[in-house]
Image: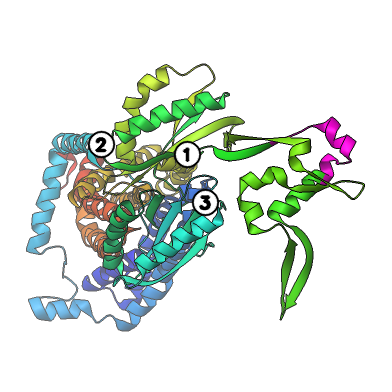
């Protein structure tokens, strides 16, 4: 509604000064349409880095640029075409109304001669006269905001406000589906009858299907299960989460469990992660264990573990090839026999309604579960007889890696940890990283210790957005040059863009909101909003000068006339952000924009006139009585 407010306010002012409706509507078009278009495009350009971000984070938020740009362009068309039409039809004869109320001629009414505007005019004149003081104070506030910004908590994306909780359980590596299913049955009995639970569903051996776009998908494993628990409301969800954490620690201490909310943004998994990479797997494991020990010293992280799990128990079969060939047993036939006996081989299908059920041929349950019976298995030979497995092979028991993760072709172990309190991942990583320096200093050549998790993904997302900032700057400078047609005025307006950081920092600290990825997008877009107001004010000053007003009075009077539309548009934007400020996802962005706009509005009305006077060396003696 910003453009509509500016157009409507300009019509109202001109009608108060005695213009008829048609002339006032025409004046609103000729005086504000193109400055508003430039401001609208600059505001849209503030979201341009989102559109160019080549990352999962950019893909997740790209629609924000598309929606905002379309809305801004359509609102400009409505403001310059439809709003003047509505004004011509609906606005009363304001000049006559003011004349009746205050007395005097309808043509001579000055809406800026009220006591309020007189006081504001004196304030602007003071800022212009003592421009150096105003500029120094503004720069000091900006530097102070940069220093205070270090105190603002850093965040990637906040948790989702959805009601689901994910309960992951992991048994020892190599555990069977049967064992995992038995643990899930115990879990289900614990969940039954809880007042805060609306519903739940369990998945044994795999994770939940992707019912939510940013869901962190899990690899299938016989020793893994996931339970999706649906709470009745947000309050119940948080109470249920605390209850589950306590009960899992008390009743299932032999399991590794994780209770997590759904994520916003690209899925990260565990928020705190450190990666160790190198050529030698045992050495990489040993280094990762040292990292895990250091991480456990931090009281805010829980469930510290390695993503490689413990080695799996395996049985190695060493075949005596000469004896096997002599008895008529080939390696292929032995492999096929063991597959049939232990796992099962496909025989046929059984049709039930519209489903095909596979039929497997395999050994008895005791033969498949009791390893002591394995050497006595009767292996068929080529001549139709059978021999015991122990006659042609020996069994050896050992361990091997169940899964080996690689990164950049190097075996990589990730040490992962969860956070169950209100600590932020970036804060904890900053605390843990210095304690890992002794380990980093002892790394052999070719070995790496890197930060992963939320902090790494946040850095990737921010760098992808920052890559689009040069394009944003080029587009904005081009628009400013087209509108202002002056390098000096273009540079002056562009320098006002970062000043919104003063309000962003103050409001984030005041409302205890973190500076996350979405808040960063709002801050970049805020620069476009600030330059938009600056363009409109500078353009008004230039119009007044071109109409014969001296520069001193042009600065003051243009600021006075732009006071109402600038304040109204900023107030409309701030009020529109209040409902968003309660959102878990958009709350930090709303608070950042609210704070930045409030402070930037004050700076536009007080600092920008002082900067203009200093930039172009406007002196008091230029004023004509």
Measured Cα–Cα span from mark 3 to mark 1: 49 Å
Give yes or no for contact between labels 1 and 2 (Cβ–Cβ under 8 Å): no
Disc marking residue 532: none
Q: How many marks?
A: 3
- Tell whether 76 sits left or right of 325: left
Q: Which residue is mark 3?
A: 223
Q: Secondary structure at mark 2?
A: helix
Q: Nearer the viewer, mark 3 or mark 2?
A: 3
First in sequence: mark 1 vs mark 2: 2
Q: Which residue is mark 1?
A: 470
First in sequence: mark 3 vs mark 1: 3
> Is 331 contained in the magenta span?
yes
**Figure check: 350 above or below 405:** below
Q: Which residues are magenta?
A: 317-333
Give yes or no for contact between labels 3 and 2 (Cβ–Cβ under 8 Å): no
Write down the quadrant of residue 230 in the picture: bottom left
**Figure check: 484 above or below 441:** below
- Tell whether 603 sits left or right of 448: left
């Amino acid at each position: 509604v910003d453009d509509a407010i500016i157009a409507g306010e300009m019509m109202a002012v001109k009608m108060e000064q005695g213009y008829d409706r048609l002339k006032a509507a025409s004046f609103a078009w000729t005086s504000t349409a193109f400055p508003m278009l430039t401001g609208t495009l600059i505001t849209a350009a503030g979201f341009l880095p989102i559109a160019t971000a080549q990352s999962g984070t950019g893909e997740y938020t790209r629609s924000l640029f598309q929606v905002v740009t379309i809305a801004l362009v359509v609102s400009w068309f409505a403001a310059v075409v439809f709003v003047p039409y509505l004004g011509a039809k609906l606005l009363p004869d304001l000049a006559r109304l003011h004349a009746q109320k205050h007395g005097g001629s309808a043509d001579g009414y000055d809406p800026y001669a009220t006591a309020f505007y007189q006081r504001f005019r004196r304030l602007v004149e003071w800022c212009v006269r003592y421009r150096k003081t105003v500029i120094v104070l503004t720069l000091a506030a900006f530097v102070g905001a940069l220093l205070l910004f270090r105190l603002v908590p850093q965040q990637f994306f906040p948790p989702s406000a959805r009601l689901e909780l994910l309960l992951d359980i992991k048994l020892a590596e190599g555990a069977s589906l049967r064992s995992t299913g038995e643990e899930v049955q115990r879990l289900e009995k614990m969940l039954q009858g809880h007042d805060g639970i609306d519903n739940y569903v369990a998945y044994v051996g795999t994770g939940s299907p992707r019912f939510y776009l940013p869901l962190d998908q899990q690899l299938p494993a016989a020793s893994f299960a996931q339970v999706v628990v649906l709470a009745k409301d947000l309050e119940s969800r948080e109470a249920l989460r605390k209850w589950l954490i306590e009960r899992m620690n008390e009743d299932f201490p032999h399991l590794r469990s994780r209770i997590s909310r759904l994520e916003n943004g690209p899925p990260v998994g565990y928020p705190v992660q450190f990666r160790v990479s190198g050529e030698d797997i045992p050495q990489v494991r040993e280094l990762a264990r040292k990292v895990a020990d250091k991480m456990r010293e931090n009281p805010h992280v829980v469930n510290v573990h390695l993503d490689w799990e413990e080695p799996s128990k395996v049985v190695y079969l060493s075949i005596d090839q000469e004896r096997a060939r002599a008895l008529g047993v080939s390696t292929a036939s032995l492999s096929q026999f063991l597959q049939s006996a232990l796992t099962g081989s496909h025989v046929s299908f059984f049709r039930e309604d519209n489903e095909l059920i596979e039929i497997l041929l395999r050994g008895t349950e005791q033969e498949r579960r009791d390893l002591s019976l394995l050497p006595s298995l009767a292996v068929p030979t080529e001549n139709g007889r059978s021999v015991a497995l122990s006659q042609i092979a020996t069994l050896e028991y050992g361990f091997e890696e169940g899964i080996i993760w690689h990164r950049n072709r190097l075996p990589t172990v990730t040490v992962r940890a969860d956070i169950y309190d209100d600590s932020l991942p970036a804060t904890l990583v900053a605390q843990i990283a210095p304690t890992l320096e002794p380990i980093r200093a002892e790394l052999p050549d070719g070995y790496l210790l890197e930060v992963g998790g939320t902090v790494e993904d946040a850095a990737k997302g921010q760098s992808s957005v920052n890559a689009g900032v040069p394009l944003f700057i080029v587009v904005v400078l081009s628009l400013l040059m087209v509108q202002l047609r002056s390098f000096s005025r273009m540079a002056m307006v562009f320098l006002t863009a970062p000043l919104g950081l003063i309000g962003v920092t103050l409001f984030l600290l005041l409302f205890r909101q973190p500076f996350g990825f979405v808040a960063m997008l709002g801050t970049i877009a805020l620069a476009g909003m600030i330059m938009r107001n600056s363009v409109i004010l500078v353009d008004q000053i230039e119009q007044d000068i071109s109409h014969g007003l001296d520069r001193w009075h042009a600065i003051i009077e243009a600021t006075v006339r732009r006071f109402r539309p600038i304040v109204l548009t900023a107030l409309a934007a701030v009020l529109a952000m209040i409902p968003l400020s309660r959102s878990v996802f958009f709350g930090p962005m709303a608070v950042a924009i609210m704070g930045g706009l409030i402070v930037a509005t004050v700076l536009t009305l007080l600092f920008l006139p002082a900067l203009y006077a200093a930039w172009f060396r406007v002196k008091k003696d230029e004023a004509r009585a």
